Image: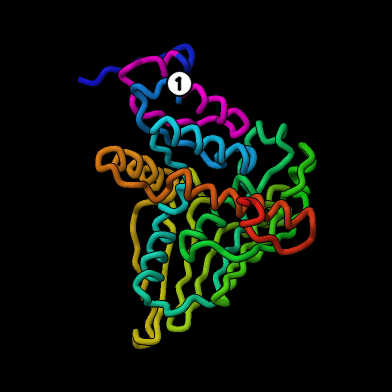
Amino acid sequence: MRSHKVYNDYRQLLADPRVEVVDVAVPPDVQLQVIRDIVEHRDHVRGVLAQKPLGVNYAEAAEIVRLCESAGIVLVVNQNMRYDQSIRACRRLIERGDLGEPVLATIDMRAVPHWMPWQQRQGWVTLRIMSIHHLDTFRFWFGDPTRVFASVRPDPRTAQKFAHEDGICLYILEYDSGLRATSCDDVWTGPALEGAAKDIGIRWRVEGTEGLAEGTIGWPDYPQRTPSTLRYTTTHGGGQWIEPRWSEVWFPDAFAGPMAELLCALETGDTPDLNGRDNLRTMALVEACYQSVREHRAVSPSEITD
């Protein structure tokens, strides 16, 4: 029979020699200190699942990765959109070559997120909270872009609560292959909460030289269980749409993926896909978006990592 224990302070939990894996679910501006406390218990803590964003900026994220690597602790970052069922299925289509060479990819988000209270003290809203999912998805599908150009404006609704710079966000990722990937992260969606009719949803689309895949993300309906969708067609498929369906949903079913990666890595010794070193490239892409906004130019993620 399993036993459960409640601690008055997380540091008491960390001191318990029975604790081998820690799931860190705290705001990003305190995550670094929690990780510093965790690595002091490297004698029994073997793995950490950390939330995204990994830090309030790239430098903090890099320090978290360094701390875990130095302590010999396996770090996985909870970029759970990679485990959304439609996003993962599209990755498989790209890997198999069903779509040919990718030409254009788009994500169109018209949704009103539930902003967390701690974001007010950060002064930022969308890029590190929602856009980070989409930027990581583009990396998951296509790898690292050469440069990104971003443009943002405040969200009128959120601006009534607190000042921020990155409410509505648009950005274009450029790849040397010629591929362009772009997202419109519209957290305003018109006066949908102020009395107007709603048109809320997240749609994505990948066009290739030999096929087209498109889908929806079911998250805006949460807590209603609405699975994401996918349909695709190829030049060698007889002009038909193929439309697989499933009952699992992004929230909360996909959240099993990152933790499963961590536990499997601890068992096998393999490097998890969502490892901290990989996540630094997503963080660099997010920071490149901020720099692009400030300087009104396309920015290479290498400018952040260098």
The 10 Å Cα crowd at callout 1, few under 14, some 14 to 19, many 20 or more, is: some
In this view, 41 is above or below 83: above
Q: Nearer the viewer, residue 155 or 33?
A: 33
Side (left or right) of 256 relative to 219: left
Give coordinates of residue 148: x percent, y percent.
66, 63
Give coordinates of residue 163: x percent, y percent.
79, 40
Q: Nearer the viewer, residue 229 or 99?
A: 99
What's under tag 1, amino acid-wise?
Glu
In this view, 62 is above or below 220: above
Side (left or right) of 168 relative to 15: right
Q: Quadrant of residue 92?
A: bottom left
**Residue 10 in view in this figure:** yes
Residue plotted at (34% across, 67% down): 244
Give coordinates of residue 81: x percent, y percent.
47, 52
In the rendered image, the residue lying farthest to the left is 1
In this view, 125 is above or below 174: above
Q: Quadrant of residue 90?
A: bottom left
**Residue 198 in view in this figure:** no
In this view, 215 is above or below 7: below
Q: Nearer the viewer, residue 194 or 19?
A: 19
Residue plotted at (46% across, 59% down): 140
Give coordinates of residue 29: x percent, y percent.
63, 31
Does residue 10 belong to the magenta stretch? no
Number of numbered tags placed on the structure image: 1
Q: Which residues are magenta?
A: 12-38
In the picture, the quarter occupied by the N terminus is top left
Residue picked out by circle 1: 40
Residue plotted at (41% across, 79% down): 233
Residue plotted at (37% across, 69% down): 95
Side (left or right) of 30 relative to 15: right
Secondary structure beneath label 1: loop
